[in-house]
Image: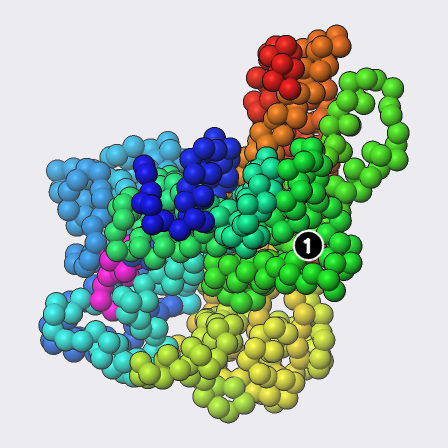
Amino acid sequence: MTLPSTTPFWLLMAWRESRAAWRHFIFFVACIALGVGAVVGVSLFSANVERAVLKEARGLLGGDLEIRLSREMNEKGQAVLSDLARRGVQVTRVSELAAMASREVTSEGAQGTQLVELKAVEPLYPLYGRLKLEPDRPLWALLNPSEDRCPRPRCYGAVVQEALLFRLGLSIGSSIKIGDTLFMITGTVRTEPDRMANMFSLGPRVLVSQEGLAAAALVKPGSRVRERYLLKLSGMGDAQSLLYELRGRLLSESAKVSSYRDAQPQLKQFLEQLARYLGLVGLTALFVGGIGVAMSIQAFLREKFHSIAILKALGSDSRTVIQVYLTQAIGLGLLGGVIGLSIGVGLQDVLPRALAGLLETDLLQQVEFTSGFSTAAIGPLIKGLGLGIMTTLLFSVWPLLTIRNVKPAGIFRRDFEGAERVGHTVTGRFGQRLLISFRTDPLPAVAAVSIGAGLAALSVWQAGSLKIGLFFIGGLITAVIALMLSAQAFLKGLRLLGSPGPLVLRQALGNLHRPGSQTIGVMMSIGIGVMVIMTIGVIEHSLVRNIGANRPADSPTFFFIDIQPDQADRFSHLIHEQTGDVAPRLTPLVRSRVRAINGQSVRVEAETEQEEQAAQTREDKRKNWYLGREYVLTYLEELPKDNTIVKGAWWKPDHLFVGPQLSIEEDAAKHMGVNVGGTIEFEIQGISVTAEVTSIRKVEWGNFSTNFYMILSPGSLDGAPITYVATVRVPPRDEATLQAKVVVAFPNVTSINIGDVMETFTNVLERLALAIRAVALFCISAGALVMAAALTATRYRRLYEAVVLKAIGATRGFIAQAFAAEYALMGVVAGTVGIVMANALAWAVLRYILDLPWSLEPRLLGIGFFCTILLTLVVGFLSTYRILGQPPLAVLRHE
């Protein structure tokens, strides 16, 4: 390619320099491509999910509108639904609850029990979306099998997740007992469009008909059940207008009415946060690549020292020469960015599959992700390319400023003198030189401040939050400074150490602190990658260990929920017979919502769209959560275990109360704006109960006991639809037997095994950490590229030293050992500092964000340390192994 004769001199020179030295910039381009690929891959994934959620919104909700309650609709609500049906609105009911399924029943008890997530539907389900079933038949036909397939006069069908078949050893055609009824398994469910996104699953999904649920007799007064009424408008009107109408008409029902526009809010929030933090990890990889850019430019300028001196001798000023090489850098950054875009687009075939198992939802399996340049991809692609070019520009400025120090007389000086002069600003003591030269030459200080501000701006842009972006760049700069100071201290210590005995070690140490060795840059880049990955690992392991360690020795094995009042005595007797202990303590429960605080009505739902949008900007989301959530109330005489009164006083036992008294958890009191002496009015299935706040408590939520936000005084809930929850502790060998006995005697009671919950939590943490760690590998890869770029930049110096050593009798083995010792030492220092920084960062996150103690993970840290050393050895060997085979004579003749 030939440029026109009218091309400006600086552009012509930039093109010629790039064309002649393209091999030198391979690592330059690779560093930018890798970082841009990570950022674009995560951004595209986020955009694709957002597009998919919008496209599949009605299917994700199950209708145009959803009415949700924590109990069955009463007569007034049923009248509203009937009115909707008369107006042409299709309505279908979905009931969701936890239940126990057993494989078979004998006189000795149930053999094989499993906690399941039960979903009961009507014939119109699903209104939107498609159920994928096996066999591929209509759902209603599978839930109502024909008489010739039924072994009993009245037969109910069930469609289950395949996991239930594996866990209970069943197959299609087998029967399972749920509640008081046997269900025949008629098929398996593959995808379920409206399943709520949740990282925690209590058990496999089971779909039955509403008639089957009624026959099972699981739903009793006060039972924990989620009732959903799905509405399909069929083009009859505006969904938003009907939304606000229903909110007004169902206000007394305490029903939550939402639109398909608000489908899967937990999924949206989780994926948004995940994409934000994965994007910041990708941005870290890009910044690490920026270090490689700076090192590549520095090494290139060292080689071009004489050319720059000649240009200045011929009349070019520093500004023109800087413009030449800055243009070259931006062009290479643009090339790396374009390659990175291709990497990011290619990741769209990987990320959805990697995250599909993270959430208990079928969205990621149902959605076809963008694999090309669609409209949804334009924003992330432009943003990724812009980040790549801006990172290149920021990291190029500092080394390019050293061009001003090159004098025309440099054409008469030796290479190594010019190299030191060109490179001293980057490799020297940054702070000391900046302070000394600021008065005479303020430009480097201005450039340093501009670079810092630019990196902060990029971080805020990527994070989408000023606070998170500044926190991220602050932590990254702290890590870089710590790594740089540690590397400088290490090199200074080597000089003070003197010459060790073995010749191989002396040669390795000499290579580390030779002029232009770029040891500090290599240690910084690898150390940052190690820090990111090890921080994720330490937090994950600490979370699992802390939760396991915080589980008291006397913590319960089971939580039994939905025990009815008429079952309480019989349940206690059964547990006493099976365990030999005293009867378990049953805690009464009743579900409610807050209606008023201090006499003022609580309004969580806005009546108009404008008020709803204003409310989002006016009220804190956390406050809305406390005001709008459903509360499980109880009444107790004694203060629960690990609860501490921080204000007010607990009521005295056997005290006669004038009215209901209330003890509230401190965070709830803070966000709800209530203090001792205030009042809270609760709505319990249409009945109002007002209680006076007499104490505020601090609750230890991690003690595996039954804890509550709100506790009422004895007698406050007389006449309310109460159920009981019981905690039972048994030896591991008796768990299956006890659970089986309870399922047979009390089919409506659900048992939750704490060990299974712990295992589920651990698996979720592992999957989440794996997803983040996969993106964090880009940081390590970028660090390896920076190391390879540094070794390639000093290749000729290493080659010359190697052939000189060969000429005086050194063997290939000796030279290889010296190189290996050098790389291993770099890995030791980078790994050590990276691990120390990772533990410091993990400690800060655990203490100030998660409010958990930090714990040392020696095995994990040891693995990370040795992997870092292995990485530096492998990269170093691949970058320099060809030097070992070069004949000395050819190189010395060239000299």
- Seen at 19% across and 44% down, the residue is 142
Residue at (57% x, 34% y) in the render: 789
Residue 632 position in % (x across, y down): 50, 69
- Can residue 887 be seen here? The reply is yes
Q: Of 884 and 780, which appears nearest the observer?
A: 884
Q: How many marks?
A: 1
Q: Secondary structure at mark 1?
A: helix
On the picture, is 447 further left or further right than 360? right
Q: Quadrant of residue 651?
A: bottom right
Q: Is residue 24 rendered magenta in the image?
A: no
Residue in the picture at 35% in, 69% down:
69
Q: What residue did someone put label 1 on?
A: 478
Above or below residue 36? Residue 783 is above
* Residue 152 x %, y %: 21, 41
Mark 1 Cα shell of 10 Å, populated few (<14), some (14-19), many (≥20): few
* Mark 1: amino acid: Thr
User: Residue 482: where, in percent of width, then height?
Assistant: 72, 49
Q: Residue visible at 27% across and 49% down?
A: 373
- Our reading of the magenta stretch's main secondary structure is helix
> In the image, is residue 219 above or below residue 548?
below
Horizontal side of 344 relative to 661 (left or right) equals left
Which of 682 and 750 lies nearest the eye of the viewer?
A: 682
Which image quadrant: the C terminus?
Answer: top right
Describe the colour scheme in one phrase: rainbow
Viewer-nearest residue: 230 or 650: 230
- The verdict on residue 53 being magenta is yes
Q: Position of residue 314 (x, y in %)?
A: 55, 45
Relative to 400, is 850 above or below? below
Q: Which residues are magenta?
A: 52-66
Q: Quadrant of the N terminus?
A: top left
Residue 200 appears in view? no
- Asked whether 48 or 758 is in front, the reply is 48
